[in-house]
Amino acid sequence: MTSLFKQSELYDLIQKVEEGKRLDFEDGVRLMKSRDILALGYMANLIREQKNGNKTYFIVNRHINHTNVCTNLCHFCAYGVKKEDPQAFTLSLEDIEKAALEATQEGVSEIHILGGLNPDLPFEYYLEMLQRVKRILPQACIQAFTAVEVDYFTQITGFSVKEVLQKLMAAGLDSLPGGGAEVFAPRVRAKICEKKVSGQRWLEIQETAHSLGMRTNATMLYGHVETAEERIDHLLQLRDLQDRTHGFLTFIPMPFYPKNTKLEGQLGVESTTGFEDLKMLAVSRILLDNFDHIKSFWIMLGPKLAQVSLAFGVDDLDGTVVEERIIHSAGAQTSQVMSKRALITMIQKAGRDAVERDTLYRVLKTN
């Protein structure tokens, strides 16, 4: 196949990928700045096939966003509000219990819980939340609380990161989602989320979770003020941590939605294109050679582009989701739910074998 790309500016990198050689920072920047999307897709798809064959994973899951009240109010976020805002809400533990009971009827195997940093909620609220959900769904994986939320829990309790995680795990937490990573570069964080934990703190919390035997996800929020170089630096910092801990399961590149955010209308900040989204997914698959999975989050990309991404290194489409609020606050036009049958059909029509993950832990034990 290499001969088909002899005229490509990326020909030497294609050869390195075919030989199983690891690409460095300069190689990554070349990939990110290239417009040869077919060469990028070829390399990414080659790695995907080596790691996962023809399989594409999905999960039957349910999102619970328990509060939109937040002290950070990041510039890129359309979800968080002050507690006095008329749109502010906080779910009671009974509300969360009701959502978990509904999920039993949907056959979910993963509950995904995220929310703002609400100053009125004590740490005990989160512990009881986990306990109630786990009682109702004992076999489901609870993936909850970003590294940003974990850091916040250390602030309101005085516990160390390790102590906070141990208490959350004892209450039922199985895994941390990858949110809050954004882009690690301090320059970027100063512009879009100056109150949020640093990139290094995010990595530190993830490393601590891995040391406790927890597998977690990683993300990048791209398409705002970051440069190609800053994207690659972010990916390589994740790769370095994965070399040490092998604790990440999946990487999810997330395109920025500017609508209703403080960045909306600023010069140069617009929604990403499908071309850029496919490139980001492909480059992620090529550089993150020690990650098992690359996820295309259909609720952000839209089902059609997510389906195409299966030819650009992606082997995971997330799941049924149900009632996602955060991305939709920023203008996502996708549905908030996709049926299991629709996911399977989308995967099979792309020529892939649809594989349902029953729980995150079972995937971890077999990969």
Image: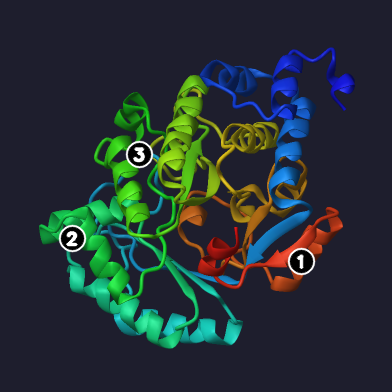
Q: Residue at x 54, y 64 (%)?
A: 365
Relative to residue 251, is residue 103 depicted above or below?
Answer: below
Q: Earlier in the sequence, mark 2 or mark 3?
A: 3
Q: Residue at x 69, y 72 (%)?
A: 339
Q: Is residue 290 left or right of residue 153?
A: right
Q: Residues within 10 Å of mark 2 (few under 14, many from 20)?
A: few
> In front here: 262 or 97?
97
Task: Tell me which amino acid carries mark 3.
Answer: His
**Camera-side mark, 1 or 2:** 1
Q: Mark yes or no: residue 323 visible.
A: no
Q: Which mark is residue 299?
A: none
Q: Is residue 131 left or right of residue 162?
A: right
Distance from the alpha carbon under mark 3 to that under mark 1: 36 Å
Residue that badge 1 annotates: 344
Task: Tell me which amino acid carries mark 1.
Answer: Ile
**Camera-side mark, 2 or 3:** 2
At which x and y percent is residue 270? 54, 32
Q: Mark yes or no: residue 354 visible.
A: yes
Can you tell which quarter of the image residue 27 is in? Answer: top right
Q: Residues within 10 Å of mark 1 (few under 14, many from 20)?
A: some
Q: Earlier in the sequence, mark 3 or mark 1?
A: 3
**Dot 1: element:** helix
Q: Which mark is residue 75?
A: 3
> In front here: 208 or 21?
21
Q: Earlier in the sequence, mark 1 or mark 2?
A: 2
Distance from the alpha carbon under mark 2 to that under mark 3: 19 Å
At which x and y percent is residue 278? 68, 36
Q: Say whether marks 2 and 3 touch (CB < 8 Å).
A: no
Q: Quadrant of the C terminus?
A: bottom right
